[in-house]
């Protein structure tokens, strides 16, 4: 779990107990944006992984798996290898 996901959960729990402050609402919006980017990037990688499997491109598949692991741990993927 990324820190942004943990903070988003914390903000949600706070919102169940009381209204969020203006700063907390802003932070929640930023967390939601980061989460959306994370989800889109993971979806892209999943689609590429399926394509690599369908074309039996093992090297590409391994690169994608590494990128997915990086995304899960760092929240972003570094420059793509060519």
Image: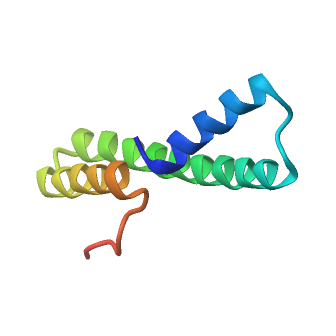
Q: Is residue 67 left or right of residue 76?
A: left
Q: Which image quadrant is residue 34 in?
A: bottom right
Residue located 39% across and 49% down the image:
45
Q: Residue furthest front?
A: 18
Residue 24: x and y in percent read 76, 49
| Between 30 and 17, the one nearer to me in the picture | 17
Residue located 12% across and 50% down the image:
58
Residue 13: x and y in percent read 66, 28
| Between 59 and 29, the one nearer to me in the picture | 29
Image mark count: 0
| Between 20 and 75, the one nearer to me in the picture | 20
Residue 36: x and y in percent read 62, 47
Q: Is residue 10 left or right of residue 27?
A: left
Q: Residue furthest top?
A: 16
In the picture, which quadrant includes the N terminus? top left
Q: Residue furthest left?
A: 58
Residue located 43% across and 56% down the image:
75
Name the colour scheme: rainbow
In the picture, which quadrant includes the C terminus? bottom left
Task: From this view, report whether residue 14 is shown above or below residue 44.
Answer: above
Residue located 44% across and 46% down the image:
42
């Amino acid at each position: 779990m990324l820190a942004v996901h943990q903070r988003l959960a914390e903000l949600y729990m706070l919102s169940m107990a009381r209204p969020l402050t203006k700063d907390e609402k802003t932070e929640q919006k930023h967390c939601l944006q980061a989460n959306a980017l994370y989800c889109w990037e993971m979806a892209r990688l999943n689609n590429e992984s399926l394509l690599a499997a369908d074309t039996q491109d093992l090297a590409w598949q391994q690169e994608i798996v590494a990128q997915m692991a990086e995304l899960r741990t760092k929240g972003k993927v570094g420059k793509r290898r060519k």
